[in-house]
Image: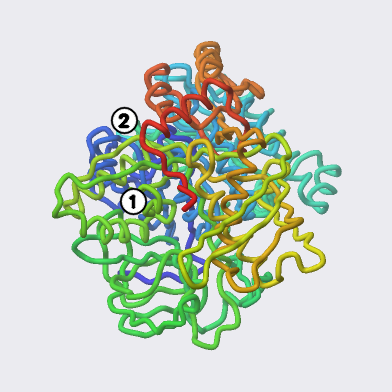
Amino acid sequence: MKVYDAPHIRNVALVGHSGAGKTQLASAMLFDADAVSRLGHVDEGTAVTDFDEEEIARRHTLSASPAYAEWQKTKINLIDTPGMANFFSDTCSAMRVADAAVVVVDAVHGAEVITERVWDEAAALGLPCVVVLNRLDRARGSLQRSLESLQSAFGRTVVPIQLPIGVEAELRGVVDLVAMKAITFGDDGRTVSIEEVPDELAGEAGAAREALIELVAEADDRLMEQFFEASTLSQGELLVGLQTATAARQVFPLVCTSATANLGIQPLLDAIVSYVPSPVSRALPAVNSTGEAASYDPGDTVPTALVWKTIADPFAGRVTLFRVASGVLKADSAIHNVNTDVHERIGAVTLMQGKTQESIGEIRAGDLGAVTKLKDTRTGDTLASRDSAWRFAPFRFTDPVLSYAIEPKSHGDEEKISTALHRLAEEDPTIRYTRDPQTGQLLMSGQGQRHIEVTVAKLRRRFGVEVTLKLPNIPYRETIKAAAEAHGRHKKQTGGHGQFGDCKIRVTPLERGEDFQFIDEIFGGSIPRGFIPAIEKGIQEASKRGYLAGYPMVDFSVTLYDGSFHPVDSNEMSFRMAGRLAFRDAMSRAKPTILEPVMTVEVYAPSDFAGDLMGDLNGRRGRIGGMETRGASTAIKAHVPMAEMLTYEQQLTSATGGRGSYHMEFSHYEEAPAHVRNQVVADAKGEGDTRDDDS
């Protein structure tokens, strides 16, 4: 295998909304660059980067997957990423090690909700973006409508550097606005002809080129002066200016393709080589030991690498994917994990072509690679020298939004579940699993129902563990609406030393999100100082089990203002019990109520469905916060109780024929309406009272 230096490497993440054609585009790029011998198709399950059984069955990318090709003596590393909100963290991880984002946009739908999310992530990382307007050969595929949608969302700096030749099914080529040449394609898409711009497109192409020149000139003072003097730029000036402006995120060039028909792929490869910066110009974000921003030299000879993904392979074991940030990482060498302070032995070093691993002797700075069987290295870790004073900035993974209880179908699988889930959590840090201390249930938490279903499928296929999913319990909370005073006295005499604790408290509501406050106003020694922490502990223990339905009590303060003690019988346990009794007494008069979690929901679908979707959200007790039209689609923002969203994924898919998507994240807690509160309390009593018995 050939080894590449950083100036001859381009690292790009293919990102965008689900269904825009990222995976098919990756397959076409690999085929046209002769990296693979046949053009893979998503619909046939032969795409290079969608090789997992679940991905093939669902026809959706579920995990970021790298591949590579050589074009114009330059290695292009592609990372095909998921376009569904449930798997967005994997997309973010891939963007951390890319030097540019290739934002793939469906020419029928324009900018969509995940398009906006990847755009924001690219901005946060400082990544240049190349926009690929894909599926232009589809009915209603339009450069003009899509460009209006993109510029409305991201600004006028999204600018075409190509125009399509032919519309919809008649698409047969593109006009290169930099070279002002027409590029037409043969029936196989790989045969390319360079011709003069057709007369019928000359006027449109000329105007589009002038708009491009003006935008590039605005990004550079020297070019602006040249533009004012000559009213234009030469092709060489335009090329260099476009390279600089793209790298600086001042211009976002747009190219035209149809990945399924294999049209426009070679000019796209040309654009990546020409306009995407090499790893030489980009250092990955780093921090020092205190978490402050730090820097390192990408040209340093000391090998360093960032682990951006872990794969749990049941046969090969743990596969660690990394980007070399400096130096050369060689096979059969050693390196230090800065995060875990563990020395790791590097065995065979490989390149990933989808699921295929190709052995290579070394990987140089700027390149992507993989290694197996590192014993103590996880996603986000830094591999460097033992005395390294810095590490790469930590990954921040999205907190789970939905939990399900899981139970093994076979008693023999109980021990295997924990091991298998641990392996999968290494691969996907957005999956969490915990044991509920109250119910004893094993809870699996993730980014949505589809995310959890995919994880269950992995448990079955990779580890032979069959589990049953049960709808999750909603994490309700309890709080109070009124202030109240209460008295708690614990007294027990059993012969010899007895037990005595006595306290008086005042409870008051707090603002939402303030949780719990304990205020000590004891004066004059009515309760010895050593017993006061025991009272607070008893109150907190009781509050965790709630009062109405067994849910934790939050957003209240307790002021301890009086009490009494016995010089012989008082001890910490007695005052702890007194605190619990005082809490229960206070709750009987403080108007306790139920809080329910409310989610921020953004639904994105073709505008034809907007009315029905808003009606459905209203029926789920949602509050519509806004509606925005983006091209042929509409984004609806709302706040909806979590309890109403458990089955929303299936409803949205059914209502929109699979064309709708949504993103959901926790927003806040608010008081549940009376009928919900009564039902929650009734359900809790039906399951048995889990509250304290005060004994």
Is residue 387 found left or right of 337 in the rendered image?
Answer: right
Q: Amino acid at mark 2?
A: Asp
Point 24% across, 66% down: residue: 317
Quadrant where the N terminus is found in the figure: bottom left
The residue that label 2 is drawn on is 187
Name the residue that disc number 1 marks.
440
Q: Nearer the viewer, mark 2 or mark 1?
A: 1
Say what secondary structure mark 2 lies in.
Answer: loop
Question: What residue sits 25% from the left and 58% below the top?
Answer: 356
Give x and y (percent) for residue 272: 51, 50
Asked if residue 505 is positioned above or below residue 17 in the image, the reply reads: below
**Does the rendering let one see residue 197?**
no
Looking at the image, which residue is at 46% across and 24% down?
660
Give neighbour class at mark 2: few <14, some 14-19, many 20+ (Cα, 10 Å): few
Rendered image quadrant of residue 157: top right
Q: Nearer the viewer, residue 483 or 563?
A: 563
Expressed as whole percent of the image width and height from the top left, the position of residue 285 reads: 61, 66
> How many numbered marks have been drawn onto this rendered protein structure?
2
**Percent x, y of residue 273:** 51, 54
User: Going by the image, does 460 lie left or right of 496?
Assistant: left
Front position in the image: 97 or 129 = 97
Is residue 212 visible in this depiction of the protein?
A: yes
Q: Secondary structure at mark 1?
A: loop
Amino acid type at mark 1: Gly
Q: Residues within 10 Å of mark 1 (few under 14, many from 20)?
A: few
Residue 139: x and y in percent read: 43, 17
**Mark 2 / mark 1, whichever is N-terminal:** 2
Q: Is residue 378 left or right of residue 117?
A: left
Q: Is 58 in front, or is 200?
A: 58
* Cα gap from disc 2 to disc 1, whole angstroms: 62 Å
